[in-house]
Image (cartoon, rainbow, N blue to C red):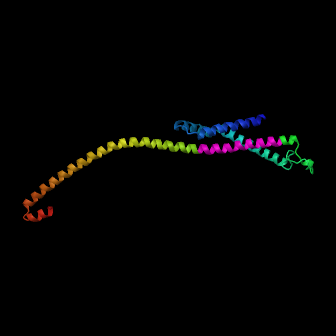
């Protein structure tokens, strides 16, 4: 395998490891660290340039493999031609062309798999980011509820005290009203009308 294809194969293995790491059910703090790392890498200009350059090279290699396979596709494979069928012997593949076909197919599969995994990793990272964000919101909501209830307990006590004070004020107003009513009734000649009104 050439150095170029060795690099492509190493990239493919690295992508598989990254994808496996992203889909593993890791604890929330570890996932949050992974998301932070991906966020830093996504903001890095050098990383963006490197990924774009890699994608362009892989797409060119993919298209080159497709073109090579198209050129060879018109020839028949000597291993599948029957021994009696020698109608067009010039159109059979030589062993060098068979090797070229094999290498082109291998390179096509490797570069296609790397391009596909790049797309898959991007989508999975987006999903993991949303998952970490929702889990962080959920955890903060749970922590916030506890403090909210604790603060509400203090507020409930404060409002209970206010209600008891208002009830005392209401009882004092009722006593004042009864006292004023009896004083009015003693001064007024129509004693019965006033008492009927108060009833």
The residue lying at 88 percent from left, 42 percent from top is 94
Question: In the drawing, does residue 120 fall left or right of residue 188?
Answer: right
Say which quarter of the image contains residue 179.
Answer: bottom left
Magenta: main secondary structure equals helix
User: Would residue 182 appear left or right of 34 to someone viewing this image?
Assistant: left
Quadrant occupied by the N terminus: top right
Q: Residue at x 76, y 36 (%)?
A: 4
84 or 67, which lies in front? 84
- Residue found at x 60% / y 40%: 22
Q: Is residue 124 magenta?
A: yes
Residue 71 in the magenta stretch? The answer is no
- Quick one: 96 or 9, which is closer to the camera? 96
- Quadrant of the rendered image containing residue 126: top right
Please tell me which residue lies in front, 169 or 114.
114
Residue 181, compared with residue 159, is above or below; it is: below
* Depth order, front residue of 80/71: 80
Relative placement, left or right, of 176 versus 37 is left
What is the x, y in percent for residue 11? Answer: 70, 37
Q: Which residue is most to the top? A: 3
Q: Which residues are magenta?
A: 100-126
Q: Position of residue 177 (x, y in %)?
A: 15, 56
Image coords of residue 155 (percent x, y): 32, 44
| Residue at x 20%, y 49% (from the top left corner) | 168
Residue 178 position, x and y percent, is 13, 56
Of the 4 image quadrants, the one containing the C terminus is: bottom left
């Amino acid at each position: 395998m050439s150095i170029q294809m060795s690099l492509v194969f190493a990239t493919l293995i690295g992508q598989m490891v990254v994808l496996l790491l992203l889909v593993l059910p890791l604890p929330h703090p570890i996932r949050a660290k992974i998301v932070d790392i991906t966020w830093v890498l996504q903001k890095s200009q050098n990383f963006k340039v490197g990924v774009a350059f890699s994608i362009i090279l892989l797409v060119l290699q993919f298209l080159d493999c497709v073109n090579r396979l198209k050129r060879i596709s018109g020839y028949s494979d000597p291993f599948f031609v029957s021994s009696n069928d020698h109608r067009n012997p010039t159109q059979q593949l030589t062993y060098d062309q068979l090797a070229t076909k094999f290498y082109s197919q291998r390179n096509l599969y490797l570069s296609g798999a790397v391009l596909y995994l790049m797309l898959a990793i991007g989508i999975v990272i987006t999903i993991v980011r949303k998952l970490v964000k929702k889990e962080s919101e959920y955890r903060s909501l749970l922590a916030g509820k506890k403090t909210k209830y604790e603060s509400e307990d203090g507020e409930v006590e404060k409002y209970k005290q206010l209600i008891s004070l208002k009830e005392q004020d209401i009882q004092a107003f009722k006593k004042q009203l009864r006292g004023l009513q009896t004083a009015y009734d003693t001064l007024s000649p129509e004693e019965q009308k006033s008492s009927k009104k108060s009833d």
